[in-house]
Amino acid sequence: MEHPFVPSRLAPVLSLTLATHLLMACPSTAQEITVFRDVAVVPMTSETVLDAQDVVTRGSEIVAISPTGSTPVPQKATVIDGEGMYLMPGLADMHIHLDTGWPVDPLALYVANGVTTVRDMAGSELLPPLRREVEKGARLGPNLLGTSPCVWGWETTPSRLVVEHKKMGYTAQKINSYLSPRDFRLVMRQVKRRDMYGVCHIPFRVGLDGVLEAKMDEIAHIEELVFEMADLDRNDPRLKRVETEPECIIEAFEKKFDTTMTAELLKEAVRPEAREMARKIRAANVTICTTLATTELVGQKVNNASGVWARDYGPYFPKRFRNAMKSGSDRHLVAFRGKEWAARLLFEMSRTVLEELKAAGVAMVLGTDAGPWRLGTAPGFAMHDELRILTENGLSPYEAIALGTRNAAKVDVAMKGKGDFGTIEVKKRADLILLDHNPLDDVSHIRNHRGVMVAGKRHPREQLDQAIALKN
Ligand SMILES: [Zn+2]
């Protein structure tokens, strides 16, 4: 009890008494075996808690789940006494960017926060070598998924890049905001022809209807749907330029709304439009990635910087980020200067969109946009922000956690991955979080976990705290 993830003193006793049986059950193997004994399982296959279970992992897999004591404990198993504790699947952050520049290894920050799978959204060159190191056990890190590099729209022939990405082995193509309608059509033709998964920003000159018509698989941010409510003139030549965002959008919102409107009035003013978008997205069966932790943080950076420093992961902000914030050169401080209301408005509108997406039954997946040091969204820590925001805006803890577990696995399957994570079931990857309290009561319990298992490897809390300890 006092030392979760540290073998219980019962272990040798159990393994001795059950030695004969387990020889048959588990042929000799070098693979490590762990038993979480007498633990309450939150399987995330449905909204339920299975009390008093033994969960057995071998190598990187979950191999057995059964009522405590009903199955013999395998020989040489490490037994974790889980009495009074909860075991849930590791979490997946399906929108991150691998980036250096953090004071400690971002991959360690993910695992230390219970994030056992991440999806890099911009074809980072860092991914293949990091994945090799993590798989070899040379580096602490999560399961690493990724999309191709972006097509932005300013390339001479963006659709050729899709062909190249497919040849390079990518199964998902990321599409950004600046494609012309013609290039967008050509890009999507290649994505479909090559049986790839398409995930996009809504190109400004194409719009949501065009994206849905093209049978896009996923839209990368809820905020993209907020931008849609700006009623942009799609022929505005500024929409070809990268610095257009948020300039054109702020300008459009200024025309459309009374910018002094209270949050509540604004949320209701945009509801009918949000509802209609949600209906169309549901009908087109497109998945929406959330990334509200970043939308919230941007609003806070612009309107209440002291709140940013007060966050519990404040000490982890990169020095360059702090300096940019303090000197006023941070890219969001610059973009919203004199229009600070707009950063607040983007978040308030996102909240309404989230509520309507949920009400319409749209498939959603959890992402935070964590990683780029310039943004400030902290790897791993942002997961807890995202879960909090989801539960503050209409999702139950179960629904919020599902976005970062089972729904993430579904997206991985659609991306031609194995999707072998996100639930506690036999044959799934042994990606687990051990907790003192039921996460289905309150998602904030996840923050205070006792340890994390990644692909069958145990990482007690103390070890993780050490791995992410700041030097000074
Ligand atoms: Zn991103």
Image (cartoon, rainbow, N blue to C red):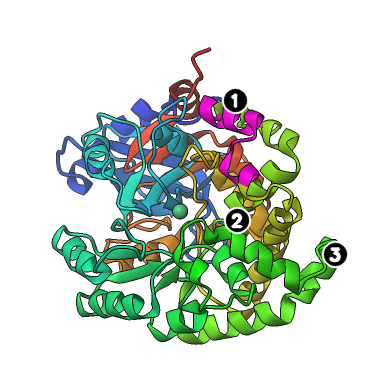
Q: Secondary structure at mark 2?
A: helix
Disc 1 packing (10 Å; few <14; some 14–19; many ≥20)? few
Q: Answer above or below: position of 204 versus 332.
A: below
Which residue does the numbered mark 2 point to in the structure image?
Answer: 292
Depth order, front residue of 261/142:
261
Quadrant of the rendered image containing residue 272: bottom right
What residue sits 28% from the left and 79% below the top? 186
Q: Secondary structure at mark 3?
A: loop
Measure how far apart labels 2 and 3 are at the Cα level: 21 Å
Depth order, front residue of 458/221:
221
Query: x, y percentage for residue 302?
Result: 70, 44
Check the picture and name the quadrant holding the N terminus: top right
Q: Which mark is residue 261?
A: 3
Q: Is residue 395 visible?
A: no
- Amino acid at dot 1: Pro
The overriding secondary structure of the stretch rendered in magenta is helix
Query: x, y percentage for residue 134?
Result: 27, 37
Residue interval drawn in magenta: 317-334
Q: Which mark is residue 315?
A: 1
Query: x, y percentage for residue 428?
Result: 33, 56
